[in-house]
Amino acid sequence: MGFNSSASHFSLLPSPFLMTFSWRNDERQEMTSKSPRAKQQKSSKGLFITFEGTEGSGKTTQCRQLARSLRDQGYQVLETREPGGTPLAETLRKLLLASSKAQGHTESITPACETMLIFAARSQHIEHVIQPALAKGMIVLCDRFFDSTLAYQGYARSLDKTFLNNTQQFITHGLQPHLTFFLDLPVQDGLARRQHTKKLNRLDKESLGFHQRVRRGFLALTKEHPKRIQTVDARQAPHALTSQITSITENVIHRKTSLRLVQSSPEA
Ligand code: ATM
């Protein structure tokens, strides 16, 4: 044969893989130790914490409680969320979460379109909000991040996880949370809580099977990243959960001596 086997292998793959392959090479070049982006990543002084969980697990409340507790200790804290966190990303969030009927049409959103809107929103969020706050030495608390993409789009929608990981690398240049809380709750308990608390969005209305695949996805991720992802039992009373989360965070702050966290000046 007049062509080598690896070239033929790639030519048989669908086009997103081909893009992924070239992004990987670009990334390798970009992240060499002398590149500006590698320096930017190394110079990040702050602490990046994410909250993950299935519907109704209470992560938004816990994120807010942790922010309050850290601010009481003098830390500068940024609370944010995904999808969203910037004006443009919040506009993309609306497109993602409203039903097509609410948007005045009947066109269903494809899994690929859903995924790309999430990554587009994340790119804006990282560049304009997360990285600048980390560079200042702030603690960034983010309600959902890339583990949600793997759980919802990867495990529940069955999109290719290698493609998702490579696209994440392409937009984040390697930025990863230092610490992630996974608030674990049986799916039916969470969905029952949700019925009472908020207007359901397009993803809330997915089938029970979908939400169960999401939870299984998160559980698989906790096994893959046992150091970064701390699983907490979301069936506990909210105040007990807050104390557990606060104590884990304080341990991480004290252990990571390389952090240069900014403190608010005491009030006069
Ligand atoms: P919250 O309900 O936690 O605000 O999140 C909005 C939705 O966005 C959530 N589903 N519901 N219901 C999960 C979904 N989402 C993804 O599908 N992929 C992602 O990467 C992120 C960040 C969120």
Image (cartoon, helix red, strand yellow):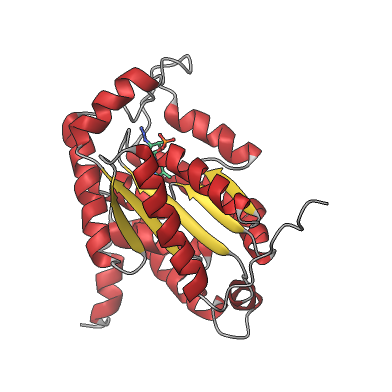
Q: Is residue 260 above or below residue 16?
A: below
Q: Quadrant of residue 36?
A: bottom right
The x and y percentages for residue 67 are: 55, 48
Q: Residue at x 62, y 62 (%)?
A: 134
The x and y percentages for residue 185 are: 24, 41
Comparing 180 with 31, the one in front is 180
In the rendered image, is residue 53 in sight? Answer: yes
Q: Residue at x 37, y 64 (%)?
A: 18
Q: Residue at x 39, y 69 (%)?
A: 21
Q: Quadrant of residue 258?
A: bottom right
Which quadrant of the frame does ligand 1 lie within? top left
Question: How many numbered discs, if any?
Answer: 0
In the rendered image, is residue 124 in sight? Answer: no
Residue projecting furthest to the left? 209
Q: Is residue 86 above or below residue 137?
A: above
In the displayed structure, does residue 185 sit left or right of residue 29? left
